[in-house]
């Protein structure tokens, strides 16, 4: 029987009087994409930011390879094989694409006390080509790129770190179809190499398609974990919000209120 790659148990986190996580647990197996889903405020980003070393838990335990795990910052987490792609921008505008990819690894490119940017650019080109970001140039300043291309640079940086666990927090909403395909290919390759992904998205169809299991959070509580064979969009929505949802989200009393008479006129 496979042992978990990662476990979180009874994780507690509060922000003042707000209890963001109330003894939440999560189990991640080797070679799987685990979906983490819930409404805004359910605790998804808080939990994953704790796993990624961005902030500490107030209480609870985490285990990596069945050994106690704790990271005091994101750099330490990356060194232990856990990388996170944030929903927000996480690059440095005044640095080049190559410098962002190899941030913290500059010593690899120093010779006789001089940083060899040309060598760094060549290595960055290999990383970008490897994930399919062929239109992103290593020497370009991040501040000159679109938000989407900046996210591709973050993906390249994560792949370069060779993560055992990649956390993807709402990244697909910032990507085009091509960008999403690049991300999905990265996730697939991680699985093939027995590494794992924690995937966060509000798109239920995307989650059901890409995730092997789904863990549902609600209001800072662990609710359930579903196997792929048990996926039903209506069931997932009910677990997320705590009640049945009708497919009819629009007011029925407006159906016969259409009119050809204008309600707004603008003259210039």
Image (cartoon, rainbow, N blue to C red):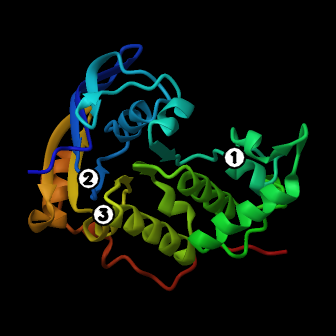
Tell me the residue that label 3 is attached to.
207
In this view, the residue farthest toward the front is 112
Q: Nearer the viewer, residue 119 or 20?
A: 119
- Position of residue 74 in the picture relative to residue 36 (left or right): right
Q: Quadrant of the C terminus?
A: bottom right
Name the disc covering residue 30, or none: 2
Tag 3–tag 1 contact (CB < 8 Å): no
Q: Nearer the viewer, residue 249 or 102?
A: 102
Task: Give the spatial CA distance, label 2 vs label 3.
Answer: 18 Å
In this view, the residue farthest toward the bottom is 260
Q: Residue, x 48% and y 44% (percent of image)?
A: 83
- Position of residue 153 in the picture relative to residue 92 (left or right): left
Packing grade of label 3 (10 A; few <14, some 14-19, many >=20) is many
Badge 1 or badge 2: first in the primary sequence: 2
Rendered location of residue 210, percent (x, y): 31, 67
User: Height in image: 44 above or below 11?
Assistant: below
Tell me the residue that label 1 is attached to.
91
Task: Give the spatial CA distance, label 3 vs label 1.
Answer: 26 Å
Q: Residue, x 41% and y 80% (percent of image)?
A: 258
Front: mark 3 or 1: 1
Badge 3 or badge 1: first in the primary sequence: 1
């Amino acid at each position: 029987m496979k042992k978990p790659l990662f476990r979180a148990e009874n994780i507690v986190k509060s922000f003042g009087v707000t209890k963001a996580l109330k003894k939440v647990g999560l189990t991640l197996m080797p070679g799987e994409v685990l979906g983490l889903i819930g409404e805004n405020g359910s605790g998804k980003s808080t939990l994953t930011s704790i796993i990624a070393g961005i902030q500490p838990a107030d209480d609870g335990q985490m285990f990596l390879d069945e050994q106690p795990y704790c990271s005091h910052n994101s750099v330490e987490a990356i060194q232990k094989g856990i990388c996170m792609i944030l929903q927000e921008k996480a690059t440095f505008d005044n640095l080049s694409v190559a410098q962002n990819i190899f941030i913290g690894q500059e010593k690899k490119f120093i010779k006789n006390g001089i940083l060899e940017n040309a060598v760094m650019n060549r290595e960055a080109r290999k990383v970008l080509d490897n994930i399919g970001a062929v239109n992103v140039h290593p020497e370009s300043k991040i501040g000159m790129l679109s938000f989407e291309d900046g996210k591709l640079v973050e993906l390249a940086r994560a792949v370069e770190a060779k993560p055992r666990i990649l956390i993807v927090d709402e990244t697909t909403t910032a990507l085009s179809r091509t960008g999403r395909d690049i991300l999905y290919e990265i996730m697939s390759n991680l699985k093939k190499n027995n590494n794992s992904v924690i995937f966060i998205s509000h798109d239920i169809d995307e989650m059901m398609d890409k995730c092997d299991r789904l863990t549902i959070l609600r209001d800072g509580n662990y609710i359930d974990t579903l196997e792929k064979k048990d996926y039903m969009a209506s069931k997932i929505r009910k677990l997320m919000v705590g009640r049945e949802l009708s497919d009819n989200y629009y007011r029925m009393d407006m159906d016969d209120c259409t009119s050809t008479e204008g309600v707004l006129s603008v003259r210039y």
